[in-house]
Structure formats: C-alpha cells, structure tokens
Amino acid sequence: MASKLAITDLLALPNSAVKIPRLGFGVYQAHGPQCVSSTLAALKVGYRHIDSAQYYANEKEVGEAVRQSGLKRSDIFITTKILTPAGSIDKSYQKMLDSVQKIDGPDGYVDLFLIHTASMGAESRKEVYLALEKLLADGRTKSIGVSNWGIGHIEELKGFAKVYPPHVNQIELHPFSQQREVVEFCHKNGIIVEAYCPLVRNQKASDPTLNSVAKAHGKTVAQVLIRYCLQKDWIPLPKSSTPSRIIENADVYDFELTKDEMGTLDGLNQGARGAIVQAVTN
C-alpha cells in the first residue's frame, strides 16, 4: 500500500465531478504574515489543499499565499466555513460571498464551503444549507459540506436539500477519538470524511504506543498519526507554522502501517472522552 499512496492523491466527491486532495493543510490560529508564510511553505512542499474558515480570520491571507505561490488557482483546493447564520438565506449567502471574495477576488470561487458547526439549531442549519446550495448553483463554490455534524443532523437535510448527501463532513479524528458511528455512516453514504486535530494538538507526543510504532518505522509520532488517517480513508488536516514540521508532516508516503499496527492504534479509542475539541452528537 505504501507505494500506492502519494501526496498527489485525490478522492472523488459524491455525485460531483470535483476531486479533493487526500492531504490537507490547516491554518487554524495562523494569522497575518505567519499565515501567508506557512501556507506558502505548505504549497512549496506539495500540499494542494488548504483548510480555512471565517472563524479563523485568515481567509484573506490564504488567498494572498495562493497568489504569491505562482501556482495555478485550479491546482489548489481551498476550503472555508461559515460559523453562524446571518438571519436569512440571502444574508447568509452574502456572508459566504464575502469569504469567497476575500480568498479569490470578486469573480473567484472556493472549492469547498462547509457549515462549521451543527450547534445553531435546526432552522438555522436549514437557512445556511440552502444558502450553500445557492452558492454552489452560482458556481462560487465547487462543493459543499458540513463540519461537526452527527448522523441526525445530516439526515435532517433529506427533508429539504437538493444536494444530498453533503460532499464532506469534517470532524475531530485521531486514534483516541475515532467517532466510529458517524464515520461508518459517512463512508456508507459516500460522504468524504475529513479529520481535524489529526495530531491531537501534540498532546499525545509521549504516548508509549504511538512512540513504539513510530520507532519501528524510524518516523515521528506526528507522521504515524497522519499515516493512520490516510490508511483509514480520512483526509487529515495537520497544521503547523514551523517550516520543518510542515515538511515532516507531508513525508508520510515511504512507509506503511501494518494491519497489526493499525489494530493497535484502533485499540487506543476512547470514544467521545478522547476528543480534545468535540465529538459529534449522533
């Protein structure tokens, strides 16, 4: 399998012509020039998928890095997210359009637009999703999806959505919180699963199991965690502002975790208790 996975790998989104890179770069808590430089460093190494959000307050910087990179816009996959509704479908649509313009200018687009959370209530979820569908129909986003949504939230869309299933669900995923129920639901329904906090924010750097697997391959704990996500068919979104770490986190294609090692890492699951940000409610 090691030879089969590469940084250039793409996954097809459900009911869509769009393909998404299997490794993403997260920019949470990266601001100003630091966001521009770390995004540029990631693009230089070979990442082609950048994950931002309105809440991160760095959409403009991500756009700036893409322009400075000299790469074709069509070769880079950019995601952003809306956290709160604006009070009507049209107002929420406008709020999304503002993000698109920050990232890619007045005639631009993003590749994926997500609803950042399910915690806004059913009416608001409907408002924002319908605004997303309008954004998609207008070509200002190439695909749409959700983040931190459980099974019930996703199934609720069946009542009104033209685009079902959503293309993506981005949730916290790593060996300590595998969210198996919602992952299985997504995989069964063709929804691409993205893993945020795949490195557990470095809180498990001294975990003996992770270190033993890392040592066996001459790799770091972070590299093992990213490789684990890739072999699970999740799209990991590691973040770092350190150039050497950005390079290291992409250097995961010259080894393979064995079936036994994957089983050992699966055994670290603590369910919702293992989440450091949030586990979804199904």
Image (spheres, grey):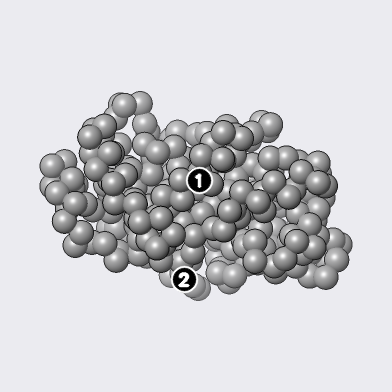
The residue to which callout 2 is attached is: 29
Task: State the image quarter where residue 229 is shown.
Answer: top left
Q: Is residue 120 above or below residue 77?
A: below
Q: Is residue 184 left or right of residue 205?
A: right
The residue to which callout 1 is attached is: 181
Task: State the image quarter where residue 200 is shown.
Answer: bottom left
Q: Amino acid at mark 1?
A: Glu
Residue 258, percent from left and from top: 23, 33
Circles 2 and 1: CB distance less than 8 Å?
A: no
N-terminal-most mark, 2 or 1 = 2
Foreground residue, 53 or 106?
A: 53
Q: Amino acid at mark 2?
A: Gln
Q: Is residue 231 visible?
A: yes
Q: Residue at x 56, y 33 (%)?
A: 188
Mark 1 is surrounded, within 10 Å at the Cα level, by few (under 14), some (14 to 19) or many (20 or more) other residues, namely few
Residue 124, percent from left and from top: 77, 64
CA–CA distance in space, label 2 to label 1: 29 Å
Q: Is residue 64 visible?
A: no
Q: Which mark is residue 24?
A: none
